[in-house]
Image (tube, coloured by chain):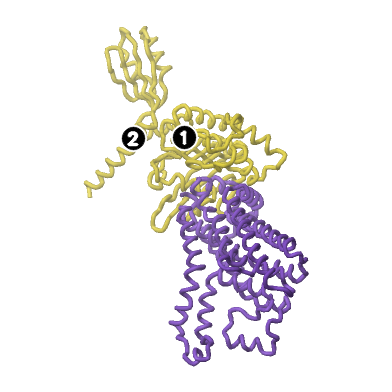
Chain colours: A purple, B yellow
Amino acid sequence: MRREGSPWEGLGSVTAKELADHLSSARMIVIGLLMTILGCAAVGVAIYAVRQTTAEDPFVLLKLFTASRAPLPSLVGVLSFLVPLMAIGLAFDAINGEHNRRTMSRILSQPIYRDALLAGKFVAGLATLGVNLLCLWLLVVGLGIIFLGVPPNAEEVARSLAFLVVTFAYAGTWLALALLLSILFRSAATAALVALGLWLFLTVIWPMVAPTIAAIVAPPDPRFELLGIPTPATFAWEESLSAISPNHLFIEAATSLLAPEVRAVGMDPLTQLSQLQGAVLGAPLPLSESLAVAWPQVVALVAGVIVLFVAGYVVFQRQEVRA
Amino acid sequence: MSTPVITARGLTKRYGKATVVDGIDFDVAKGEIFGLLGPNGAGKTTTILMMLGLTEVTAGDIRVLDHDPVRDPLGVKRRVGYLPDQVGFYDNLTAFDNLVYTSRLMGIPARDRTARIMEALERVRLADVAEKRVATFSRGMRQRLGLAEIVMKRAEIAILDEPTSGLDPQGTLEFIAMIEGLKHEGVTVLLSSHLLDQVQRVCDRVALFQTGHIVLMGSVAELARKVLGAGFVVEVEADAAADLDGRFSAIPGVSSVVRVGPDRYRLTADRDVRPEAARAVVAANGALRRLSVDDPSLEAIYTRFFQQQTQTGEGARNAA
C-alpha cells in the first residue's frame, strides 16, 4: 500500500529549527571552544615543527595537518578523537529527547511524515558539524599563511579540501550512529553512554584487539618473521578487522590525502612492494592517485553513514509514538 | 444525525498476541462533542492514534473527513488537531516560538503566522506570556498552549486526550469552557477521559471503552435508560388533601411512584415529567413546595454497568 503526500514536507522547517537549536546551544559553544583551542594548539606545534625541520617541502601547508610533536598529537589525530565526540554530543538525544519532552506525538500530529523529522535532525546535525569543520579548516589555513608566510598552492588547497570532505564523512558516520542509538534507547543518558562506550572501544581498544585476533585466526608465518615483514594472511586479517573502526578508515584516508608520498594504505607488504617497483622513493603522488589510494576508505565511511542512517530510519518508522 | 466526520468499522489493533482495540464501530457527527470514556488501558489512546495515522491499523476501516489515515495521514493531519495526553513543549523556547515551529510544520504562510498565533494565544488567555519560556509554565498553561495550537491550526476536528487530568478544579472549569467555545465554532471535538464528571458536563455522546471494546455508546440520557432502567428521577414535595400517588402514576411514562416522606414522592420515569407532575399537584389543589430532577449521573451509570457485568460474569461462572 502506497502512502500519499511527500515525505519531504516539513523537512525544511525541522532542519531550520534543529539547526537554530544546535547553534544556540551550550553544547555547541563547548564544542566550538574545544575545537578552537585544540586546533590552535595542534597548528602551533605543527608550525614549530615545520620551521625546524622542513626547508624545501612543496606541501608545507599539508604539514600543518599531519606534523606532530610529542606529547601533542597532530591535527589529524586530534580530529580523529574529537569529531566523534562532537557528533555524539549533537545527536545522542535527538529522538529520545522528543519522547522525553513529550513533544513527539504533538509534532508528528502535524502534517509531516516521520521521515521529515528524522532526516531534518540528521541534516541539521551534518550542517552544524560542517560549519564547525569548515571554520577549523579556515583557521588552520589562515594561521598557516600568517605564520609560515607561504601562500598555499592549488594542490595543497585541493588536498586539504578533500581531507575536509573525508572528515565530514567521518563525522557523519558518528552522527548517524548517535542518531540510531537515540532511537534505540529511550533514555538519553543510556544512549550517550553506549555511544561513548562504542567510541572508546573503536578508537582505543579495537586497534589493540584487532592484531591479536588476526594473529589467532591466521598465525604469523615464521619465514616472513625472519624476513622482518608481516605475514600477508595475518596482515590481511588485521587490516580487515581494523577497518571496522571508522577511526582507522579516517586516519588511513587522511594520511594518503595529506601526505602525497604515501603510496598505499592498508595493503599487505608484498603488494606494497609491487607498488614501490620503479618508484622514486619519497616522490609525491599526483592528487588523482592519492584520491585513488584513499577511495576505498572514503567509500567505506560514506557507506557507514548510509547503513547506520537507514537502520535508524527503519527502527524509527516502526516505533510506537506513545512513550 | 448529520454526516459523520469520523467513521470506524471493525477497527482493530493488535500488538503481537495482545488485542488492544477489538473490532470497534462508531461514527462521530459533525459539530458534536464525543466522549471516549473508560479506564486507563482500555484502548482510547490507541484508537486516537489510529485516527491520526500515528500507529498502524491491524484490521478494519477508519475514515476521517473522507481521508484514509493509513494511506493519507497528511490529509488527515492537515485538518485535525491533536492534544496528546500530558502534552510537552520545547522548554527552552517561548510559547510564541513553540507555536511558530508548529505553524511552519502546518504550512501556515509566513505573513499570516504572527496574527494567527497571537489570536490563538488570546483565545486561551496566554497572550501576555507569549514571550515567556515554556519552562516557566504550569501544567494548566501547557494544556492551554496545546489548545492554542489546535485553534491556530483551524482544525475541523479537535482530538483531546485526557486534557484535564492533573489540572486544578479552576483550571478544569476554564478548560472545559474553552472546549465548549470550540464546539460553538462548529469544531467537532473528541474528548478522551476517565473523569466521568467532566465528560458528562460537555459531551453530547459518549462511548464507553472496556478492554478494547465499546461496551456502551450514546447520549448520557440514553445510557441511563439502558443501564439504570429509567432515565429520570423526579422528586416532588407537595401537600394535598387528595391522593397524589394515583395522579402521579397516571402520568404517561412514569414507571413507579414511591412515597419517601410524609409529603414527599419519588417518581421514576423515562423522561422529564416535571411539568406533568406540577400540573397534577395543581389539579389536586395541592401546594407544590419542591420539584427537582436528579440528572442521571454518568458515574452511576458507569458503576452500575460494571456491577452488572461482574454479576453476570459470576452468574455465568456459577452456572458453569
Q: Residue at x 60, y 70 (%)?
A: A250
- Please report the residue visible at 53 percent of the width from the left and 64 percent of the height from the top: A311
Name the residue type under label 2. Thr
Which residue is nearer to you in this view: A118 or A59? A59
* Residue A222 on image: x %, y %: 47, 90
Q: Nearer the viewer, mark 2 or mark 1?
A: 1
Characterize the local packing of mark 2: few (<14), some (14-19) or many (20 or more) Cα atoms within 10 angstroms: few
Kindly tell me whether residue B170 is visible in this rendering.
yes
How much space separates mark 2 and mark 1, taking CA atoms? 21 Å
**Parent chain of label 2:** B
Left or right: A54 in relation to B62: right
| Figure quadrant of residue B92 | top right
Q: Secondary structure at mark 1?
A: loop
Query: Does B133 sit left or right of B17 as displayed?
Result: right
* Residue at the spot 70% in from the left edge and 86% down from the top edge: A280
Amino acid at the residue labelled 1: Thr
Give left or right: position of B74 versus B232.
right
Give the chain letter at badge 1. Answer: B
Residue B235 lies, in percent from the top left, at 35, 18
Q: Is residue B163 above or below residue A117?
A: above
- Specify the label residue B164 is tagged with: 1
Task: Choose top left, top right, bottom left or bottom right for residue B232.
Answer: top left
Q: Position of residue A211 (x, y in %)?
A: 48, 78
Q: What residue lies at 59% left-to-right and 46% top-to-bottom? A: A110
| Mark drawn on residue B155 | none
Judging by the rendered image, the residue that carries numbered circle 2 is B303
